[in-house]
């Protein structure tokens, strides 16, 4: 039994009776217990996984209707709620938080007979890009455990890459799916804003974040997007997926398509030579596949990281204000505190990066400073949207390296917050403009992965996946060493 | 010159559910913290779902107050920490960044003075804080989130009032208007609250908060003007501050804590997409909008010749004006209006009585018709009304049941008249000299018939008997 198989191959194997759901699930659990002490992809593993697997096996044996997932083990980032179980956002503040309801994406997976195998590690409240800010310790990159797996959905990336599960759901506010996808050599898709319901996703910066699949293949991302996308009456921001089948004609090819190579993302100061070489190589591949590639400059790009951190801190300051330990939270002796000092005490459990952004979020939109920071950030955002709209009149896709650098060692970058933030340089544009973007594994250099990012216009996931598929088919990467 | 401005918070109590979740908008019957859900409790991952009906109701209010209304609205987060706010921000609206709230720049006339409305906005009510036994021993503050998320409309006026009396009049008119629009029941406890700001010539603006009722608002404003005037007379500076209304002592007291420049870090609530209110929607709402109180009054006076006073009373009350419209068959409008204002309003003077009442429009028009055609006396009509309210039976049936019909049978009446004439020998003699005495004899007949004798027939028969 190959734990590394794709979701689509898993489904056909189950249908062919090559193994049972229970067999695969217990092998996956075994794999988790073998490697996860080292990798720390999971914060919690589902105790009921085997029981769920048996139930689905029974359904299969008795020829009942079985959901599209046929019991495949899927991990979920620990910022999506499941009724009756813990959702911590890798924070001490939510250490004991048990959600009273289930998020839409997980309900959809459950109704398609997926097995939620466990909740994955992340940077606290999804703020970070290395999982070093998890309150429960970082996850490790399966390609080299001295290196970070990326973040904030680092645990999800590791769990898929290390074959601890078939696929995972992450969330992406500024690259949090694509960055660990690139660092762990898996496929990661951030859908158009509104295509996937956020109901049950603990908000960090709710105007730009999305849930998306992290998978072994592009087809698997299409498969999962088919399941999780569409209008949800519990999320007013959701848009119609028009019942698209994202798997349909996924091998259509990209002959004649126009691809823009984003200049600012391929000549930036922090870009590593190896990553640039890989990107240039990918451009050649796209041309071989029949696409027309051309440089395109987006004037607003240099301002996007500043705008991104200004907007996300503002929203985070508001979204995280509810963690005052009054309605839920953790025990502490409240005697001797008046209201404000109680709240300060409650919030002192937040980690350093979250506190940094809370402080930033209190400052940049405040009456005396909004004009200089928050309102300017909004202006950058709207100008960027105008630029993107204009660019997609001419181009079908935009490409760049997903991350300007390869995975780095623990502690190597974290000391300098500003240069750390610049690692988001290539990914934040898709969030600020609401467009879909995917990271496709492209190379392993010096034993560490490099991913290529492809962006498309709003709701163009179908053609985006076709393009990603075409690129994926040209690469042949080694097995993960763990 | 004294300047008074108001900030009124009015709950849209006629809505089924809260502004962003399915919990009940009317929370009053619930045990503490039972009318709640993940959304109004701000549980992580929950998202607000806009109640579109609230947008419609708020737009109706804006239109009724002659406001400008936008073509699309957005919501904003007002961020501050307070235990009654489950999310530590309130979802509200803002007139800034090129956005407007649901209405702005309106007006309403009060005692021939135009009061300008600065803005109207739709927002969520916070929870309720209950200071349980706030004594030295137990200083517990309890929070009940049942109210959290109730749809609230904030109406802010310009400081156009000059007297507490104008304030009171405005609040009366506004309550009637909101009731007439069927958006709110101002009679419900806590459904309408108000803050005021008061300044006198040469003084700073003072805010008064924590005013529990409209009645107290007038008193608070009155107190504050007097306080400020007495300071001014003694040449003491009136400082800009927030004062609380002390309900027990009926005075305003300084809130003491220095109000810092409020820092709310307003930003767009991205979880609720922009709501379009296009011309089509506005026209539909306008078509649904009930006739305004003033035009209703005008119509009652000009079309039916109802006196201005009666028309005023009738038009300002939604329940009784509806009853009037139902009873009115164009012929007896004036009598119907009079019967409602003189008899029925007294019989149905509480909400409970109105809810229990079985009285229909037809009953009233029938009753007026019966009186007009002398089938029943006014005195009997009152008894009949009492009965109709209780059981809702047909008027003819009630008259039969209670034997309220006129005695208009000549033979019966003649017998009674003979009886009266026999008993009242002196009056009969006097009547021959003074015809006015006849009325006394009519009264005696009425007495014997318990008011049911047909008065005209009685008079005719009496005169005949007396040879007048
Ligand atoms: Zn609720």
Image (spheres, rainbow, N blue to C red):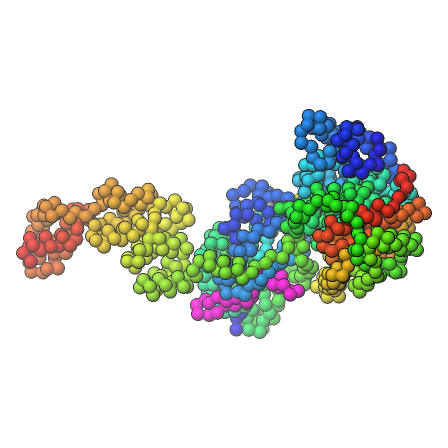
Q: Nearer the viewer, residue B273 or A114?
A: A114
Q: Residue shown at 52%/68% (left/top)? A: B116
Quarter of the image for residue B5 reads: bottom right
Q: Residue shown at 66%/50% (left/top)? A: A239
Q: Is residue B360 left or right of residue B104?
A: left
Quarter of the image for residue A264 reads: bottom right
How far from the left and from the top, in percent, is residue A438? 79, 50
Asked if residue B102 lies in the magenta stretch, the reply is yes
Q: Nearer the viewer, residue A105 or A278?
A: A278
Q: Nearer the viewer, residue B167 or A319?
A: A319
Asked if residue A321 lies in the magenta stretch, the reply is no
In the rendered view, tell whether residue A110 sits above or below residue B365.
above
Location of ligand 1 given as a quarter of the image: top right
Q: Residue shown at 38%/56% (left/top)? A: B321
Q: Residue shown at 56%/72% (left/top)? A: B232
How far from the left and from the top, in percent, is residue A241? 67, 48
How far from the left and from the top, in percent, is residue B21? 59, 47
How far from the left and from the top, in percent, is residue B145? 60, 46
Span shown in magenta: B93-120
Q: Nearer the viewer, residue A179 or A151?
A: A179
Badge count: 0
């Amino acid at each position: 039994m190959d734990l590394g198989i794709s979701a689509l191959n898993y489904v056909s194997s189950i249908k062919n009776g090559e193994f049972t759901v229970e067999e695969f699930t217990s092998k996956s659990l075994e794999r988790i217990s073998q490697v996860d002490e080292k990798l720390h992809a999971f914060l919690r593993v589902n105790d009921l996984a085997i029981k769920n697997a048996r139930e689905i096996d029974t359904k299969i044996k008795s020829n009942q209707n079985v959901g599209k997932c046929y019991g495949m083990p899927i991990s979920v980032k620990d910022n999506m709620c499941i009724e009756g179980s813990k959702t911590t956002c890798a924070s001490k503040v939510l250490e004991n938080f048990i959600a009273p309801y289930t998020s839409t994406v997980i309900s959809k997976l459950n109704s398609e007979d997926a097995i939620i195998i466990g909740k994955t590690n992340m940077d606290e409240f999804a703020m970070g890009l290395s999982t070093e800010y998890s309150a429960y310790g970082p996850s490790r990159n399966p390609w080299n455990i001295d290196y970070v797996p990326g973040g904030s959905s680092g645990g999800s990336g590791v769990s898929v890459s290390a074959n601890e599960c078939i696929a995972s759901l992450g969330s992406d506010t500024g690259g949090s799916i694509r960055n660990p996808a690139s660092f762990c050599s898996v496929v990661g898709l951030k859908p158009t804003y509104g295509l996937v319901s956020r109901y049950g996703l603990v908000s960090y910066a709710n105007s730009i974040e999305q849930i998306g699949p992290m998978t072994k293949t592009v087809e698997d991302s299409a498969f999962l997007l088919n399941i999780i996308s569409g209008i949800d009456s519990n999320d007013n921001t959701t848009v119609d997926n028009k019942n698209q089948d994202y798997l349909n004609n996924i091998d259509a090819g990209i002959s004649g398509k126009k691809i823009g190579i984003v200049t600012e993302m391929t000549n930036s100061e922090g870009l590593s030579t190896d990553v640039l070489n890989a990107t240039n190589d990918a451009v050649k591949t796209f041309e071989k596949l029949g696409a027309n590639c051309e440089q395109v400059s987006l004037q607003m790009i240099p301002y996007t990281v500043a705008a991104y951190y200004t907007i996300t801190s503002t929203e985070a300051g508001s979204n995280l204000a509810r963690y005052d330990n009054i309605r839920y939270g953790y025990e502490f002796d409240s005697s001797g505190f008046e209201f404000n000092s109680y709240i300060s005490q409650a919030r002192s459990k937040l980690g350093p990066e979250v506190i940094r952004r809370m402080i930033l979020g209190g400052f940049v939109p405040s009456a005396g400073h909004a004009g200089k920071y928050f309102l300017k950030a909004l202006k950058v955002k709207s100008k960027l949207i105008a630029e993107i709209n204009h660019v997609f009149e001419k181009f079908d896709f935009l490409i760049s390296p997903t991350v300007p650098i390869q995975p780095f060692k623990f502690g190597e970058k974290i000391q300098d917050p500003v240069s750390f933030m610049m690692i988001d340089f290539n990914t934040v544009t898709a969030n600020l403009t609401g467009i879909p973007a995917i990271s496709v594994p492209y190379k392993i250099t010096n034993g560490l992965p490099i991913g290529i990012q492809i962006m498309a216009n709003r709701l163009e996931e179908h053609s985006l996946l076709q393009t990603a598929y075409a690129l994926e088919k040209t690469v042949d990467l080694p097995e993960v060493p763990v | 010159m004294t300047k008074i401005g108001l900030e009124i918070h009015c709950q849209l109590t006629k809505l089924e559910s809260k502004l962003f979740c399915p919990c009940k908008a009317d929370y009053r019957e619930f045990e503490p913290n039972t009318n709640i859900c993940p959304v109004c409790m701000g549980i992580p991952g929950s998202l607000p779902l806009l109640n579109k009906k609230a947008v419609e109701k708020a737009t109706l209010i804006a239109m009724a107050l002659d406001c400008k209304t936008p073509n699309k609205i957005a919501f904003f987060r007002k961020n501050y920490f307070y235990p009654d706010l489950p999310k530590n921000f309130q979802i509200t609206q803002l007139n800034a960044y090129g956005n407007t709230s649901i209405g702005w720049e309106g007006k309403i006339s009060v005692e021939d003075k135009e009061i300008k409305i600065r803005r109207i906005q739709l927002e969520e009510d916070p929870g309720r804080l209950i200071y349980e036994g706030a004594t030295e021993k137990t200083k517990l503050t309890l929070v009940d989130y049942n109210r959290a998320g109730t749809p609230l409309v904030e109406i802010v006026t310009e400081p156009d009032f000059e007297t507490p009396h104008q304030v009171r009049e405005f609040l009366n008119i506004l309550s009637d208007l909101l009731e007439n629009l069927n958006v709110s029941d101002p009679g419900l406890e806590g459904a309408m609250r108000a803050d005021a700001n008061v300044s006198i010539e040469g003084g700073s603006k003072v805010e008064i908060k924590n005013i529990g009722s409209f009645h107290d608002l007038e008193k608070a404003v009155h107190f504050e003007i007097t306080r400020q005037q007495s300071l001014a007379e003694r040449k003491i500076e009136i400082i800009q501050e927030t004062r609380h209304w002390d309900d027990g002592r009926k005075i305003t007291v300084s809130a003491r804590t220095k109000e810092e420049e409020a820092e709310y870090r307003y930003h767009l609530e991205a979880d609720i997409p922009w709501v379009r209110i296009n011309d089509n929607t506005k026209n539909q709402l306008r078509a649904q909008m009930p006739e305004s109180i003033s035009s209703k009054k005008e119509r009652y006076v000009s079309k039916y010749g109802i006196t201005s006073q009666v028309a005023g009373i009738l038009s300002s009350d939604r329940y009784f004006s509806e009853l009037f419209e139902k009873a009115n068959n164009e012929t007896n409008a004036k009598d119907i209006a009079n019967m409602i204002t003189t008899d029925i309003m007294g019989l149905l003077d509480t909400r409970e009585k109105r809810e229990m009442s079985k009285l229909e429009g037809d009953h009233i028009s029938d009753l007026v018709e019966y009186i007009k055609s002398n089938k029943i006396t006014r005195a009997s009509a009152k008894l009949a009304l009492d009965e109709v309210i209780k059981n809702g039976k047909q008027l003819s049936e009630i008259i039969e049941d209670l034997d309220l019909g006129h005695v208009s049978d000549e033979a019966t009446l003649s017998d009674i008249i003979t009886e009266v004439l026999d008993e009242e020998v002196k009056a009969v003699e006097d009547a021959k000299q003074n015809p006015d005495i006849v009325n006394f004899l009519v009264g005696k007949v009425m007495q014997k018939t318990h008011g049911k004798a047909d008065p005209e027939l009685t008079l005719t028969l009496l005169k005949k008997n007396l040879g007048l």
